[in-house]
Amino acid sequence: MTGEDEGLATLTAQRWERVNRRLVARVLAEFTYEGLLSATFDSDGWRIELGATDYRFTATRGVWGQLRIEPASVERHPAAGPMRVTVLMTDLATALSLDGATTGNWLQELQHTLLADLQIDARRARIRLADLDDIEQQALLSGHPKLVASKGRVGWGLDELARFAPESGEPVQLQWLAVARTLASEAPGNQIDRWGLPQGWLDADSQNELTRRAAARGADPARYRLLPVHPWQWQRWVAPLYADALASGEIHFLGAAGPALRPLVSLRTFADVHARERAHVKLPLSVRNTSCYRGLPGDAILAGVRLSAWLDGICRRDPALHPRLRVQRELAAVHVRQRAYEALDGAPYRFRETLGAAWREAPAARLVSERTVLLAVLAEREADGTPVLAHWCRQADCSVAAWVGALFRNVSAPLYHLLCAYGIGFIAHGQNVAVILRDGLPVGALIKDFHGDLRLAEDAPAIGLDAVTTAAIKRLPADHLVHDLYTGHLVTTLRFVGDALAASGLLREERFYAALAHTLREHQEQHPEYASGFRRYDLLRPRMARVCVNRALLAAGYDDSAERPLPVLGPPLDNPLYTVVHATPTVDATHD
């Protein structure tokens, strides 16, 4: 099947209408949540006015002030044919005074998202997500739910989507380079073999074949290291940008070798479905996706090995964390410099992040009688609308309230402790945190991705961490750092888990957040020695800043920049952890 056939095989009028309606509802809901749009309720139901046009729909308002919109109910007045994201974007461009360049580029990302949603919709109709293992689940997730253009993949067409996108389910065989060690920077603390790879990562036959190819080109392990590269990245970016190094012999192209790996939900991380204990490898992909190009910044990935070992040590030594919070450690990393762009002040960041690799432990290597599911999976629903987590409630033979109580005690509370006890902020969104399940019940969390997603308070001591690695960590004031947990964990992930449970009638949002607030207060009572940290990183205050990613994208536009875009603030947020506790009695998280 060609890429064109594969990409469009699921395109039917009924399915196209369905995925469009879902995305229209998502845009309206998230733009309303971020304060870009205002919704009113009258005798005809909910309405969002966009100048001469308005959108009407059936919805309920949640405790965050968000709208839970029924996609099938959305109507445009005046009608403009079938419900389409393209029409909505035209309406939004006028109402929000968006320029044509931003609107056009953003619409492209939304169209790409719809194309991916088509394949996911078709495959999800035939399976139960809960029946799949972690690697297979990641091919069928909705993406970051608060970022509406969650699968933009700008730079890829149908062929690339069919070959390399997670939802295609296709394995990818990586290509290989021999890179002069004078050009490659290796992470301090790497655990590597003579070719610069994690011990045993390549099987003997593959490594012998690559050694033979390298020797034929005069590249020996004393002066060169082996480096995997994504096939598309090699063809589109590496070969042209590193032509000088190829011509001089600093880089040799060795061709494809090694196991075929499956892309995970992040696009650029790969896992072996046939050898699940094999370390995952993360590679640069200069594709614009979820607001930025998905390269690998050198300073950040090179700090990952020692940083993850340091954090792992903290988690193992602290009884409040061990064994609940575990670290998916980085094993090795390499960054290959692009000299021309590194010497150019203000060059777009994507040109400095095109070649390198980072390896991290596979979850299966850390677990014996347990399994993991990404936190993002808990916000998903099966084709019949049932929340996926209901499966694990049945497996654990417990109520939904008891199950989420275990989730809060063993996932949310340890992350809160890490922040308050050590001043360590971790952007704990649904793709960075895996829930560890034993017999269906949450017993802990496995965290990953420390290049850029782990930060320290401005005055937090990094005891036991070397100066070079410490210098690579971003420092933030307390008011900013608290949002790594509040926005990264609650707003970006738990908001949608609670939403799925409420929409299906399994657990009211008020009970969900009262249980979370109870868990956090209980943790405070158990650890009075960290009272100053609890005050400093107050998750229970009445109002919080509303950090908005869609606003940030529209504000930044699509011009190349030297730095990655930063979030912006919307209207202040009434904190549900405060409002539900003061509106309802304290709820014991362990009971219905």
Image (cartoon, rainbow, N blue to C red):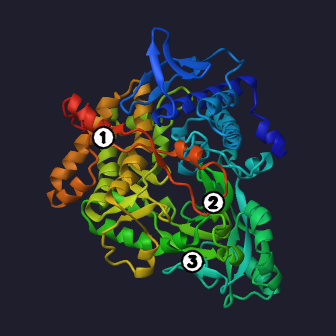
Can you tell which of label 3 and label 1 is closer to the viewer?
A: 1
Residue 284 seen in this snapshot: no
- Residue at 19%, 47% in the rendered image: 522
How far across and how far down the image is residue 109, in percent? 67, 43
Residue 481, quarter of the rendered image: bottom left
Q: Nearer the viewer, residue 514 or 152?
A: 152
Horizontally, is 378 left or right of 255 in the view? Answer: left
Amino acid found under the numbered disc labelled 2: Ser
Q: Nearer the viewer, residue 448 or 271?
A: 448
Return the residue at label 1: 543
Q: Nearer the viewer, residue 445 or 470?
A: 470
How far across and how far down the image is residue 234, in percent? 76, 66
Horizontally, is 371 left or right of 464 in the view? Answer: right
Q: Nearer the viewer, residue 218 or 91?
A: 91
Residue 473, quarter of the rendered image: bottom left
Q: Are marks 3 and 1 in contact (CB under 8 Å)?
A: no
Cα gap from disc 2 to disc 1, whole angstroms = 33 Å
Q: Which mark is residue 561?
A: 2
Amino acid found under the numbered disc labelled 3: Gln
How far across and how far down the image is residue 94, in percent? 64, 30
Return the residue at label 3: 199
Question: Which numbered disc flags the more N-terminal residue, 2 or 1?
Answer: 1
Q: Quadrant of the C terminus?
A: top left
How far across and how far down the image is residue 177, in percent? 73, 75
Question: Dot 1, how many residues are within 10 Å of its Cα: few (below 14), some (14-19), or many (20+)?
Answer: some
